[in-house]
Amino acid sequence: MNTPARSQAFSMANPHALATILEAAETKHIIASSDIFDLSGIKLWAKDRPVSAELQRKLYDRQLRDPLETCLLAEDGVTHATLTQSLQALLAAEGPLRTLLAPHAAKLEREVAHLPLHSVAQLLLTAGQASRPETFEHAVQAMALCGAMMDAHGGTTAELRSAMLCGLLHDLGEMYIDPKYNEADAERTLDFEAYQQLVVHPHVGHLLIAQLTNYPKSLAQAIAEHHERLDGTGYPRGLKRDEVSPLGRMLAAAEAALTVLRGAEPDLARVSVALRVVPGEFDITWAGEIASLARMAKAGPLHHTDDELAKRLVQLNDALVEAHDSVEVLITSAESEALKDALHLADALLDRLRTGWYASGLWSTEAISALDASEIEAVEDELIHRLCAIERAAWLHAGELSDGDAHRLNLLGQSLRSVAL
């Protein structure tokens, strides 16, 4: 199922992807499936020759006639049997994700054997499994959760397979950025430099699928959109509402759920809160599929007493007000339109947080006696995370700033980060 391709984006071997493939080749049999030529027609590597560190030297600073990914094959790599075994291990593992998947386990196990594995996808999945096992585990989790969501939604067999494939392949673009900037920390401790690197991976994943495989365009589009939000606060393009495809909406909700489950305190109450704490972020259909299952799960342990929670809720409410006031002051002193635009974005995001805060009823400390305490903790933690994320979004939107404006934006960041301390 190899597809010849010519792509400017992949005319040179990506150093991070190549390093991962070479590391995988130490334990997997990865060979050239065709002769590898540079753009001038010089043969750099012969067909059937195993890849090695020498290939890395040959490819250095050379433009290729065909993308490297289309010229390599993992002979003993990821197969349908591998995916089935990984899925079965996931379904047997204790944890909150199992609760979401259990009602759909039989169908997931049946359909995983029918997912089309293009040679490029199989190569990159194999490299990830061998060199970055946590990324392969995440891919299998996303494959299973997307399949379970589509099955719960009543999707056809074709829709179920498409959903599973989206989940399996959605993060292949991460292999093309420095591994220290990947999503292993669930995006919740990334500084701006790391975040700035990470935001390109959905676009790279889209290019991989669209240019180097014969998968449907809808799958490539969904992969490009798996970090978008319907209110326009996602990345990399800040799409809104109908600009996000149906598959992209599903994948975004699944990815957000798995992000929470990779955190320090993974439980389904926190997943449910993350998908609805800011109204309008996620498609209510897909968020609802997860939330309905989450409500049936046993809540995780509490980490604060009622009195401690009451104090924290008051502090967080005060922090939301203070952050809004800080933005208003900084806008008046901004030297550039870039900073003003970034601050207006931060203010809009704070408004959405306040909307979620008031909708939850947590502005009143009486909520502690009226609502489930574990949900209150989850809302609090999620809002703290969102406050910290606003700083990253503002920096990304602002771009290059003068020293004075950079200092002003830093002041806002210090205010937002202090809430989480």
Image (cartoon, rainbow, N blue to C red):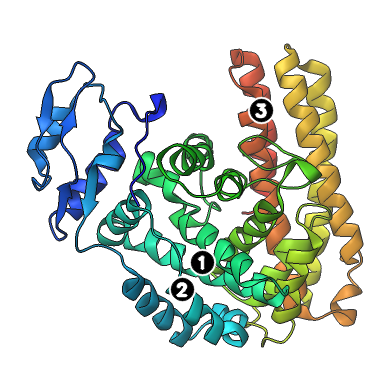
The CA distance from mark 1 to mark 3 is 31 Å
Residue sitting nearer the eye, 246 or 345 = 246
Q: Amino acid at mark 3?
A: His
Q: Earlier in the sequence, mark 1 or mark 3?
A: 1
Element carrying mark 3: helix
| Coordinates of residue 78 in the picture (x, y in percent) | 30, 64
Element carrying mark 1: helix
Q: Residue at x 69, y 40 (%)?
A: 415
Residue 360 quadrant: bottom right
Is the residue 173 above or below the residue 300 in the image?
Answer: above
The CA distance from mark 2 to mark 1 is 9 Å
Element carrying mark 2: helix
Residue 98 quadrant: bottom right
| Coordinates of residue 323 in the picture (x, y in percent) | 79, 40
Is the residue 252 above or below the residue 261 in the image?
Answer: above
Mark 1 — residue?
143
Q: Earlier in the sequence, mark 2 or mark 1?
A: 2
Residue sitting nearer the eye, 37 or 351 = 37
Mark 3 — residue?
397
Which label number is shown at residue 292? none
Q: Is residue 280 left or right of residue 87?
A: right
Q: Is residue 52 left or right of residue 111?
A: left
Mark 2 — residue?
112
Q: Is residue 267 left or right of residue 354?
A: left
Residue sitting nearer the eye, 55 or 347 = 55
Which circle, 1 or 3, is nearer the viewer? 1
On the question of residue 379 being in view, the answer is no
Which circle, 2 or 1, is nearer the viewer? 2
Q: Residue at x 89, y 52 (%)?
A: 355
On the question of residue 5 being in view, the answer is yes
Q: Residue at x 26, y 25 (%)?
A: 65
Q: Are marks 2 and 1 in contact (CB under 8 Å)?
A: yes
